[in-house]
Amino acid sequence: MTSITVPERLNRYLARRGIASRRAADALIEEGRVQVNGAPTRLGTLVDPGADRVTVDGRPVGEPVPLRTLVLNKPTGVVSTRSDPQGRPTVLDLVEDPRGLVPVGRLDADSRGLLLLSSDGALALRVTHPRHGITKLYRATVDGHAPAAALRRIQTGVSLEDGPARALEAKTVTTSRYGDVVEVLMAEGRKREVRRLFAAAGMRVVDLCRVAVGPVQLGRLHEGQARPLNAVEERALYEAVGLDPPRRR
C-alpha cells in the first residue's frame, strides 16, 4: 500500500528536522540557501515530505527528529542560543545529543538555573507566550536587605523602558552571606526583566537562579547537567499549554 504524506510549509519541515527554528528557517529561505528538488524556494513554499528532495547549502535534509524536551541547569557564562558569534559556550554545548533542540525562551548569560530545551516548536511557542500563563519562579539574591516596602513595589508594578512590569509574588525566603534571597514569581520573561524590576525598586541582584517553569521544577539537578522530562512533568506541561503530549511507542 502506498503511504500518503501531507504537504507542509518548508519552514516547519526544516524545524522538524532540527535544521533551525521556524523563524531561523525563514531566514535561510530568504537568503537562498534552501532548495527543493534543485530549485530555489520562497517563503510559504509547500513541500511533500514523501516525494520532495530538500537541501540546505547543498546538503540533503535528514529525517524528522523525535519530539523531546530536556530540563537543563544552566550555569552562568553560558548563552541561551543555538550558536554564538562571539564564541561563548551555548546551552546546546552542554547536551550530549542536541539534534533538533532549541532553547525555550531565554535565561541571561549571567543568570543560572532551569532552562527547557525542546524539539517541539509548538510547545516552545506556547510556553514562552504570556497568553498561556506559564509562570517562571526565580530566587534572587540581593545585595544586602530586601525591604518589605520594596517587595510590595515589585508586586504593585514599576515602569521600565519597555513598559510596565510586576511580579505576581515576591517574598524573602532566606538570607545568604551576600544578602536576602527573594523568591519571585513572574508571568512573563522579557530581557533581564527580573534584574531591572529589582533595580527600579532600589535593590541590586547579585545572583539570579530560575527554579521552576510552570509545573517543571529544577530540583536537585546539578549545574551544567540536563535530563529529559519525566512522564508526569511532560503531561503537566503539555496540558498547561493546551497541547496533547507526544505519543510514545
Image (cartoon, grey):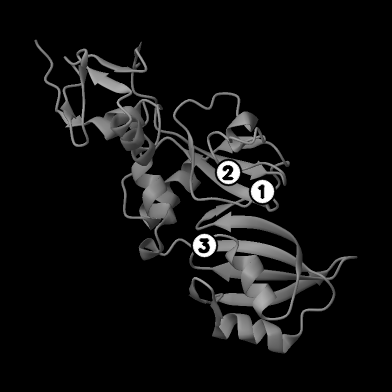
**Label 1 to label 3, Cα distance in Å?**
14 Å
Looking at the picture, does residue 181 appear above or below residue 2? below
CA neighbours of label 1 inside 10 A, class few (<14), some (14 to 19), many (20+): some
Q: Secondary structure at mark 3?
A: loop
Compare residues 231 and 88 and report the one nearer the observer. 88
Instruction: For the residues labelled 1 and 2, say whether their Cβ atoms are less than 8 Å apart.
Output: yes
Quarter that holds the N terminus:
top left
Name the secondary structure under disc 2: loop
Occupied quadrant, residue 93: top right
Q: Residue furthest top?
A: 1
Q: Is residue 119 in sight in this rendering?
A: yes
In this view, the residue farthest toward the bottom is: 149
**Label 2 Cα crowd, 10 Å radius (few <14 / some 14-19 / many 20+):** many
Image spot of residue 180 (x, y percent): 81, 72
> Where does the image place residue 150, in percent across and percent down from the top left?
69, 84
For the residue labelled by badge 1, is the local secondary structure a helix, a strand or a loop? Answer: loop
Q: Earlier in the sequence, mark 1 or mark 2?
A: 2
Location of mark 1 (residue): 109
The residue under label 1 is which amino acid type?
A: Ala
Image quadrant holding the C terminus, namely: top left
State yes or no: discs 2 and 3 in contact (Cβ < 8 Å): no
> Would you name the residue on which mark 2 appears?
80
Look at the picture and state if 132 lies above or below 160. above
**Quarter assignment of residue 130:** bottom left
For label 3, the residue is 190
Residue type (three-letter) at the residue carrying disc 3: Arg
Question: Does residue 247 appear to the left or right of 174 in the view shown?
Answer: left
Of callouts 2 and 3, the N-terminal one: 2
Which of the 4 quarters of the picture holds residue 22? top left
